[in-house]
Image (spheres, rainbow, N blue to C red):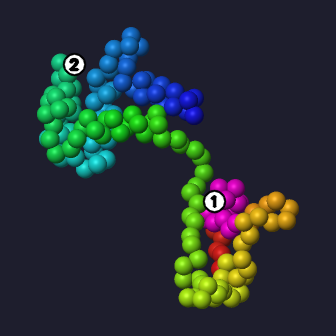
Amino acid sequence: MKELSDRGRSEIEDVIYDENGNINMPSLSKMISDDAKESDANDNIITGLTVEDGKFKIPLSALSGMSVESRFISMINKKTIDIHMPGGSFIQRSDFGIKDGDGLTMLDESYLNRGRRLNMLNEDGSMDSIVSINLFKHIIPNYNRMTFS
């Protein structure tokens, strides 16, 4: 975890500091301006984020309509605190709508796993799961030309 956080900190430092350890205002301005543009900030804010004589045209605290300082802190947190791992997300779902009011399962052969219950723990120590084929599309040859029905 610490190594991932340090890597993010290093990425941020490479953007906002120059080789002498001074703040690289043009690079910092570009980073914050790009974020402002992505969040549909108005032109006044984007203009205020430009650098003139080594300073922001308008001090960050004076820019209204968008908390630039808060978004900047968010960018730092995203790089240093949030853990970025490869892979897709999994969706868990409850059995709501699959069981009737008496707790009886209302599944037939048309449901996933042919209506059979998935086991949390099998006799061999494994666990049943159903995973979307989308998670494997990058390794399935010609996936984009396949149809699944």
Q: State which quarter of the image contains the N terminus.
A: top right
Per the model, the C-alpha gap separating discs 1 and 2 is 47 Å
What stretch of residues is rendered in magenta? Answer: 129-144
Tell me the element at label 2: loop
Residue drawn at the location 74% of the way across and 70% of the way down: 119
**Neighbour tally class for label 2: few under 14, some 14-19, many 20 plus, Cα within 10 Å:** few
Q: Amino acid at mark 1?
A: Leu
Tell me the element at label 1: helix
Q: Position of residue 7 (x, y in %)?
A: 52, 29
Q: Residue furthest right?
A: 124
Residue drawn at the location 56% of the way across and 29% of the way down: 2
Residue drawn at the location 34% of the way across and 14% of the way down: 22
Q: Position of residue 81 (x, y in %)?
A: 47, 37
Residue 97 vs residue 41: left or right? right
Q: Position of residue 68 (x, y in %)?
A: 24, 38
**Quick check: 101 above or below 6?**
below
Quarter assignment of residue 115 = bottom right
Q: Nearer the viewer, residue 8 or 43?
A: 8
For residue 44, the mark is none
Pointer 1 residue: 135
Residue 33 vs residue 101: left or right? left
Q: Nearer the viewer, residue 65 or 97?
A: 97
**Neighbour tally class for label 1: few under 14, some 14-19, many 20 plus, Cα within 10 Å:** few
Residue drawn at the location 51% of the way across and 31% of the way down: 5
**Quick check: 145 above or below 33?**
below
Question: Which of the two discs, 1 and 2, labels the residue nearer the N terminus?
Answer: 2
Q: Nearer the viewer, residue 77 or 142?
A: 77
Pointer 2 residue: 54
